Image (cartoon, helix red, strand yellow):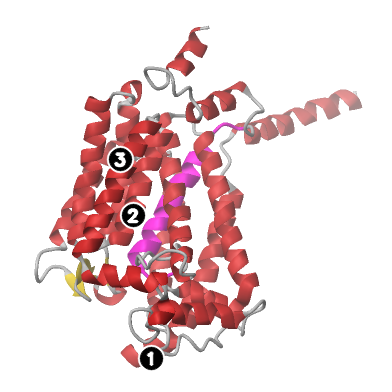
Amino acid sequence: MNSRGAGSASWPGSARSSSARERPQPDRLLLFTTVLLCAGGLVMVTSASVAFAYNQHQSTFYYAERQVAWLAIGFVALFVLGRIDYRRIRPLAPAGAVAAGILMLLVLVPHLGVSVSGARRWFDAGPLGTFQPSELGKLAFAVFVAHWVDRNSQRMGDFQHVFVPFAAMLAGVLVLLMLERDLGTAVVTVAIFLSAYWAGGGRLRHIILLMGALGLGFVAVTLLEPYRIARLTAFKNPWADPLGAGFQATQSLYGLASGGIFGVGIGHSIEKYGWLPEAHTDFIFAIIGEETGLIGTTLVMLGFLVFGLRGYRASLRAPDRFGMSLAASITTWVTFEALLNMATVTNTLPITGVPLPFFSYGGTALATTLAAVGMLLSIARHGSGSALGNNRRSDETFDRWRRDRRAPVSGSRGRARVSR
């Protein structure tokens, strides 16, 4: 009787444990990594901006306070979007893309947009600083392209009816960004579009063709702007003009080198005291290297590596093509932008004006990126329950990324498998 009682008593617990296993679970490692990166970013923005904030606004924590406000907005968006089913956002994709495009047009209108150093990319957001529509556009366009790719999934190999409209959409967005003189965001936007197209079934030869055309366009826009030519010249040898065109690059390298292995300590940077321009925004990675040394920069890079692995894992395990393309584009956006920023700061690539995600000061970029992470967490939560290779469903999901490129229509291999 006791054994029966014990057995019957175990049934409710077993049912609860079974229900817990079946309930979609969030990717805690992805969330934890994001929180750590944001916490590190807040510390570094506070440290890197104190001198500039006091000189400009007579308030040591002027930028840190606004970063905290945008961080709060971003995490609210992250937790809301992470809790709801990402597929519920899909009907809003066309309207969101149109709204982002309109805002990017309006920012070019005199007296509406704010002009800084000849570039017109921002609206005045009052106490919160400025609002940059192109940052919101990254997320809006990522959702729309994933939606568009899924709608055209059965004919992704069609050059005329799929690839040409896709290239035209990308060209339209790039024209707006070039009018805003925002080459860095344009490069990241290309990565967002191409990653969604590739993950959704796009042909490799079409992507290569588009990248060749974009490369020629990059050369053209560079030659048309004298300041971009100066950046390329300084990139080749910044020490040829260390007080002119190469000043920012040389000061960035000085900051990284002076940090050594362990850094000079949080708050003890010299470069932030007027030596390194944009120390709390695009070049914050140099301050990280100066204050925390090689150990700190390595930890930051490992953080983005973990973020990328978990993001692409969510893409490979997504339950549908829309989720797969959206997760791939968001992960590529964050990791590629981080790689581009680090390459710029270390003078591996010419200066492009790309922020370091979660670290650089910039409210719109921070809040939008966190909202995108919320969508990524939702996709991960609804993905398959087993690791790749442990079940047939995961193998088929992965096979859609490594599909047979010789098939006349993308995805035919997967359909043939189902028919068998």
| Contact? badges 2 and 3 (CB < 8 Å) | no
Task: Please provide percent x and percent y for residue 36.
Answer: 57, 63
Label 2, label 3: how far apart the Cα atoms are: 13 Å
Quadrant location, the N terminus: top right
In the picture, the disc for residue 187 is: 2
Does residue 104 appear left or right of residue 207 in this picture? left
Answer with mark 2 or mark 3, whichever residue precedes in sequence: 2
Residue 258, quarter of picture: bottom right
Amino acid type assigned to the residue bearing label 3 in the image = Leu
Residue placed at 43% from the left, 72% from the top?
68
Instruction: Assign a secondary structure to mark 3.
Output: helix
Residue placed at 35% from the left, 37% from the top?
207
The image shows residue 119, relative to residue 279, as above or below, that is above
Instruction: Assign a secondary structure to mark 1.
Output: helix
Badge 3 local density, few (<14 within 10 Å), some, or many (20+)? some
Q: Residue furthest top?
A: 420
The image shows residue 234, relative to residue 205, as above or below, that is below
Residue placed at 57% from the left, 47% from the top?
309
Label 2, label 1: how far apart the Cα atoms are: 33 Å
Residue stretch rendered in magenta on the structure? 360-385
Amino acid type assigned to the residue bearing label 2 in the image = Val
In the picture, the disc for residue 210 is: 3
Residue identified by numbered label 1: 54
Does residue 312 appear left or right of residue 230 in this picture? right
Task: Please provide percent x and percent y for residue 205.
Answer: 37, 32
In the picture, the disc for residue 94 is: none
Numbered disc in front, either 1 or 3? 3
Does residue 273 appear left or right of residue 226 in this picture? right
Badge 1 local density, few (<14 within 10 Å), some, or many (20+)? some
Answer with mark 1 or mark 3, whichever residue precedes in sequence: 1
Query: Does the magenta stretch mainly form a helix, a strand or a loop?
Result: helix
Numbered disc in front, either 2 or 1? 2
